[in-house]
């Protein structure tokens, strides 16, 4: 794998190899190996055109733990603010001999465009593009699920919320369906669901009580207001009533169902605090796994 722009084209053995590698890195860390030198001498650039806490920090940590040098490109203080076009920025940065670019952009398809326009051998890793893909989130979600419930073929997984604008939902669907999850349910108001033909691996629900029934994994999504017109913002109290995860609703899922959320969470809008912080919540495990998955991906695309 030279680039990682989406999980959709990846075969099951490739996804499993990345998860196995992330798992070995997690075990090495648990046994005290915090730093490896697999990418010593390599330079990795974080190129984030949208805000991020988890993804940007964990890519930086992952790169440093592998011994690479990391540059965090500050868009606000870059020549992008003076009107420089994306591909001119790309070629300028490539001329400084980078090995990998981690890119987040509001426009779907930007990582693939960078791959097409790159003039050097730089690897491109997608850290989230529009509503298209967030492949490392899909991998870390799959890893978190596999750690608790290894036989994915037996699982029912519900993804609830603003699915329409969610790159996480799309990457989760690609990862989980490729890994053998057969019962994948997407739930949200009709205005926030994608067309049924876009994700034929899934069943669509608009009633959360029905969708969550017996689910082993409940993945909640944030309302992505930054991708909506103000007029389309749902009323938050009504939204929580219909689509929020609270104690009553979680009781409809399978006993000990995993509660997940890619973050950032909006407490009281898509998830109650007592659930986000409760015993079934795996949200902070997802964050921890993000570092190991990103170490695995960087090692893979940089050929080590
Ligand atoms: N899950 C996720 O992408 O979070 P950040 O926006 O904080 O990176």
Image (cartoon, rainbow, N blue to C red):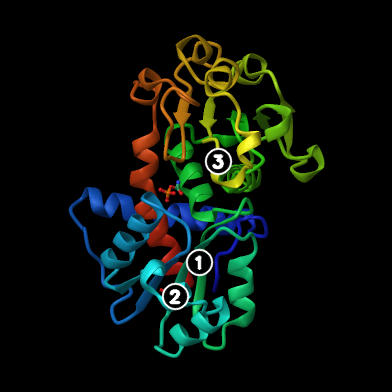
Q: Residues within 10 Å of mark 1 (few under 14, many from 20)?
A: many
Q: Relative to the observer, which residue lies in front, 97 or 147? A: 97
* Vertical relation: 248 (above or below) 57: above
Q: Which residue shows up at 43% across the image and 40% down it?
A: 263
Secondary structure beneath disc 3? Answer: loop
Q: Are marks 1 and 3 in contact (CB under 8 Å)?
A: no
Q: Which residue shows up at 32% across the image and 50% down it?
A: 26
Q: Which mark is residue 83?
A: none
**Residue 172 appears at what percent x and percent y?**
58, 44
Q: Which residue shows up at 58% across the image and 75% down it?
A: 114
Query: In terms of image quadrants, where is residue 115?
Result: bottom right
Q: Which comes before the other along the chain, label 2 or label 3?
A: 2
Which residue is tagged 3? 224
Judged left or right of residue 117, residue 263 is left
**Residue 42 appears at what percent x and percent y?**
34, 80
Secondary structure beneath disc 2? Answer: strand
Judged left or right of residue 159, residue 204 is right
**Disc 1 and disc 2: Cα gap in Å?**
7 Å
Q: Are marks 1 and 2 in contact (CB under 8 Å)?
A: yes
Q: Is residue 171 visible?
A: yes
Which residue is tagged 1? 125
Q: Which mark is residue 100?
A: 2
Q: Residues within 10 Å of mark 3 (few under 14, many from 20)?
A: some
Q: Relative to the observer, which residue lies in front, 225 or 164? A: 225
Q: Relative to the observer, which residue lies in front, 267 or 96? A: 267
* Vertical relation: 263 (above or below) 4: above
Query: In terms of image quadrants, where is residue 24?
Result: bottom left
Q: Which comes before the other along the chain, label 1 or label 2?
A: 2
Secondary structure beneath disc 1? Answer: strand
């Amino acid at each position: 794998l030279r680039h990682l722009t989406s999980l959709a084209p990846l075969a099951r053995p490739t996804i499993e190899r990345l998860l196995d590698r992330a798992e070995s890195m997690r075990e090495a860390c648990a046994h005290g190996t915090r730093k490896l030198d697999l990418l010593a001498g390599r330079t990795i650039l974080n190129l984030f055109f949208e805000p991020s806490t988890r993804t940007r920090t964990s890519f930086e940590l992952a790169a440093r733990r592998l011994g690479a040098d990391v540059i965090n490109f500050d868009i606000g203080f870059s020549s992008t603010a003076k009107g420089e076009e994306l591909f001119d920025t790309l070629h300028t940065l490539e001329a400084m001999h980078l090995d990998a670019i981690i890119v987040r952009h509001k426009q779907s398809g930007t990582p693939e465009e960078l791959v097409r326009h790159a003039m050097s051998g730089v690897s491109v890793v997608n850290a989230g593009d529009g509503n298209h893909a967030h492949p490392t989130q899909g991998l870390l979600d799959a890893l978190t699920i596999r750690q608790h419930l290894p036989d994915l073929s037996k699982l029912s997984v519900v993804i609830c919320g603003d699915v329409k604008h969610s790159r996480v939902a799309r990457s989760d669907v690609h990862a989980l369906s490729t890994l053998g999850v057969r019962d994948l349910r997407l739930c949200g108001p009709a205005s926030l669901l994608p067309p049924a033909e876009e994700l034929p691996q899934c069943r669509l629900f608009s009633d959360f009580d029905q969708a969550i029934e017996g689910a082993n994994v409940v993945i909640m999504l944030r309302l992505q207001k930054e991708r909506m017109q103000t007029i389309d913002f749902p009323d938050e109290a009504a939204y929580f009533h219909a689509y929020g995860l609270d104690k009553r609703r979680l009781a409809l899922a399978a006993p000990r169902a995993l509660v997940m959320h890619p973050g950032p969470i909006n407490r009281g809008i898509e998830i109650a605090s007592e659930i986000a912080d409760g015993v079934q919540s795996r949200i902070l495990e997802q964050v921890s796994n993000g570092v190991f998955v990103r170490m695995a991906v960087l090692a893979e695309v940089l050929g080590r």
